[in-house]
Each structure stands twice: as structure tokens, then as C-alpha cells.
Amino acid sequence: MDPQLYNYWLVILLMMTGLYALIARGNLIRKIIGLNIFQVSVFILYISAGFIREGAAPILSPNVDVYSNPLPHVLILTAIVVSVATTALGLALVIRIKAAFGSIDDDTLSYSSGDSATELSIKTQKSSQ
Amino acid sequence: MISEVIDIALLAMLWIICLQVIFTRSELTAIMVFGAFSLICAGLFLAMGAADVAFTEAAVGAGVSTLLMLNALRRCGTDRCNSSRRGVIDIRALALTGVTGAALIWGTRDLSGVGLADNPVHLHVAPRYLQVSFDEIGIPNVVTSVLASYRGFDTFGEVVVVFTAGLGVWLILGSGKRNDGKADEDE
Amino acid sequence: MSDDIILRIVGKFLIPLVVVFALYVQFHGEYGPGGGFQAGVILGAALILYRLLFGDAAARKAVSPRWLRLQAAVGVLLYGGTGVAGILLQGQFLEYNVLLTDPINGQHLGIILIELGVLLTVSATITALAYTFSADTEEHLSDPQVDPSSQSDQLRS
């Protein structure tokens, strides 16, 4: 195998660690952190693909010949801002879950599912109106 | 040589932080460590020649994301009741991520090495952007000219997504003043 | 809501600098790293810092949530409007060459306009997120039985 692939392998390791945090941890906020780690490792994957050894940042200058690829940079730049917006949306849902069910733990939420939880959420909604 | 060492060192630091996020006891530590994760990531982006991306990641990932998570944590409180799962290795999750990771690594064997100038990704539109964008657009920062002009439609979509997400948070949580008497001034 | 005099004084010095830096990043984005997204986040951070130091009421007085909603929408409309202006001038959607007689100047104008739209939307959204994630809604979400009037008294005290 090509030894220069180490960058991709480390990124995959990072990605899988984030995925593990997303699946295995019970706390919803920690799940969102895991999701963010997964997202950021995708960003690193793209930037690695756009990387050229000895390449400068793609800002044109008369003394520089080699630039890294600007296209992945553009895609990831906007993706980072979108990722904070989606993270905020997820955290807002977590806050609502806490308000409706009194817990943000996966296990507790699963045990209290069914009638009692539905009842609780209906009650909360009614009284907040 | 030195750039490989920097790359590997930064990626290894990121991985150690990931483990910290998984195994630390307090949510507060996990969030603060995630802030450090974003900052190291920004350094990694800069080392790979992506100055604009590094800038954005430092401002957004390390600043705003961490702030929002801390706010959410303060409002949810630390949940102490999942002690049953804390510190325990989840075998099923480990198997799933292991298989997925192995499949992805198997997939990388077709890719050419990182950082080579003749990779297919560098031969398609990127040379055109670098060669003619200054004559066509007239600004030296190629990232800005691609972002705002060549791929302006793309960026328009991203702006709409940011706007929609803000709107969604507003609808989910309320404008922050609905119930406490002073509501009328901004409604 | 900090009573720490060092934080307040340093904040008073820092916030204008942060705002100026945001504007620098915005308008220098064509020559160095930067642009609407980064400048928007930095501007949002300045407002968040103001809110952390001087409290929610002062921040709402300075930049009201209603204004933020308007600003976010105006940003998206400015971006879209620049695109539509291209169509009206017999070009295509988001084609800047037709905006002015000289194509290069048209490109410059188009990029400045849409980066301004990005700045408005992103900064308003980031600030609005900080407002909505604040503690004010906490009571009415988790314990709806609390009497609204007593709650606002608590806030004032």
C-alpha cells in the first residue's frame, strides 16, 4: 500500500471515534459532540484531498507557483458555518427534550417511553400555553 | 518531512482529544476539550494551506459552537443518571464502528497519496480557477472568487440554510421573551 | 451581568476593536483570508461579548431581537436580489458581469453585495442563537406553572 495514505487513515480513525461517541454515549449533548467530531473529520478529509505538498494558501501572489486546491476550501468553509447552525438546531431540540421529559439521557428516555412519557409531554404542552 | 511530522502530530492530538470526549466523566470537560479540538483542527487546516478554512474553524468551531454547547449544558444540567454506561466499552458500537472503519480504510487503497500535485482532484477545474480567475474576477483571493462568483449559487444555498436554522431555533425555543411580562416590546 | 470592573473596562476597549476587525475581515476578504462568513461570526461574537458583560437587557436595547430577525432576512434578500438583478439586466441568475458596463467592476460590485448579504445573515443568526439560548426562557420551558409576573420581578432584582 501507498505509505502516503496515512492522513486518510488517521482521519478515518477520528471519524470512527466520533461515531462511537455518537452511538455509545448516553448523554444527548455528548452525542452532539460526537456528531461534531464526525463532521470535523469529514472536513479534514476534504482539506487533505485539496492539499498539495509545498503548496501555498490560494491567494494569488507573483512570487508563488504552487497553490493548494481552492475548491475543497470553498466547500468546507461554507460547511463549517452550516455545521454550527445545525448544531444549534440539535441543541435546541435537546433543551426541549429536557423540558418535556426531564432528562437528556438516552437510557432514561428509553425507559420512560410509552404512555407515561406521552402523557408528560402533552401535560407540559398544555400548561405552557 | 517536517510537514508530515506536523500533520501526524496534530492528527494524533485530535485523536487523543476524541478519546477524552468519550471517556471523561463530566460533560463540561467534554465540551471544553471539544473547543480545544476545534482549535487544533484550525492549526491543521493552516498547515495544509487552507487559511480561510482555518480562520472560519477557529472562529466558529472553537468560539461559537463551544458557547452554544455550554449554554445548552447550563440549561439541561449535568445528568448523573447514566453511570451504568460510563466507562463501559459498548461491544456492539465498537464492532459497528470497527467494521465501518475497516471498510473505509479498504476503500482508500484506490486513492493516490495525500499532497501529490498530479492527483486527479487537482487536474479538473482547480487549475482553471488558479490561472484565469484573476483576469475574470480581478481579485487575488481565489477562495473568495470561487465562493462568491463561480459557485455563488452554492453559497446562496448555504446562506439560506443558516437563515433557516436560525429560524428553526427561534421557533423551537421562542424568541426568549415570550412569557415574562416584557414580551410586547419586541413582538 | 458581570460586576467585575476589569472585565467591564477591558470589554469596553475590546468590543469596538472586535467590530473593526470584523469589518476589516469583511472588506479585506478579497485580498487576504476572510469574507462574509468569518466577518459575520466575529461581529456576532462582539455582540455576544457585549451581552455577557453588560447583561441581557442592555444587549436587547442595543440590538433588539426584532432587528436581528429583519437583518437576517434582509441579508438573504440582498443576496437573492443581486442574483435577480443579473436576470433583469439580461444576464443569468447571479451573473455579475452585467451589473456594470465593465465586467471586472461588475464582478467586484456583485461580490461586495453578496458578501454583505452573507455578513448580515450570519451575524444576525449567530447573535440570535445566543439570545435564544440564554437563560430567560428556562423557567417557562421547564416549569410552566411559574407566574410570569413573579418571574420578571426575579429578573429585575
Image (tube, coloured by chain):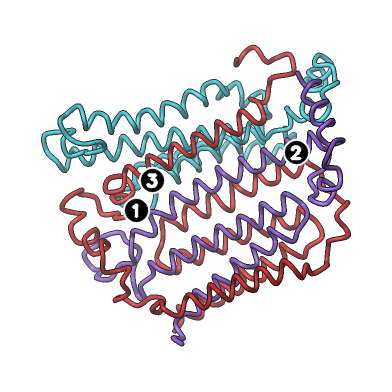
Chain colours: A purple, B red, C cyan
> Within 10 Å of the Cα at label 2, are there few (<14), some (14-19), or many (20+) other Cα atoms?
some
The alpha-carbon separation of the residues under discs 1 and 3 comes to 9 Å
Residue A53 in the image, given as x and y percentages of width and height:
37, 76
Marking on residue C32: 1
Report if the CB atoms under discs 1 and 2 are less than 8 Å apart.
no
Residue flagged by tag 2: what amino acid is it?
Answer: Ile
Position of residue B55 relative to residue C136, above or below, is: below
The alpha-carbon separation of the residues under discs 1 and 2 comes to 43 Å
Question: Are labels 1 and 3 assigned to the same chain?
Answer: yes
> Within 10 Å of the Cα at label 1, are there few (<14), some (14-19), or many (20+) other Cα atoms?
many
Marking on residue C100: none
Marking on residue A97: 2
The chain to which mark 2 is attached is A
Quadrant of the rendered image containing residue C27 = top left
Marking on residue C35: 3
The residue sitting at 55% across, 42% down in the picture is A85
Q: Nearer the viewer, residue C142 or B53?
A: C142
The chain to which mark 3 is attached is C
Q: Which dot, 1 or 2, sits closer to the camera?
A: 2
Q: Secondary structure at mark 1?
A: loop
* A8 on left or right of B83: left
The chain to which mark 1 is attached is C
Residue flagged by tag 3: what amino acid is it?
Answer: Gly
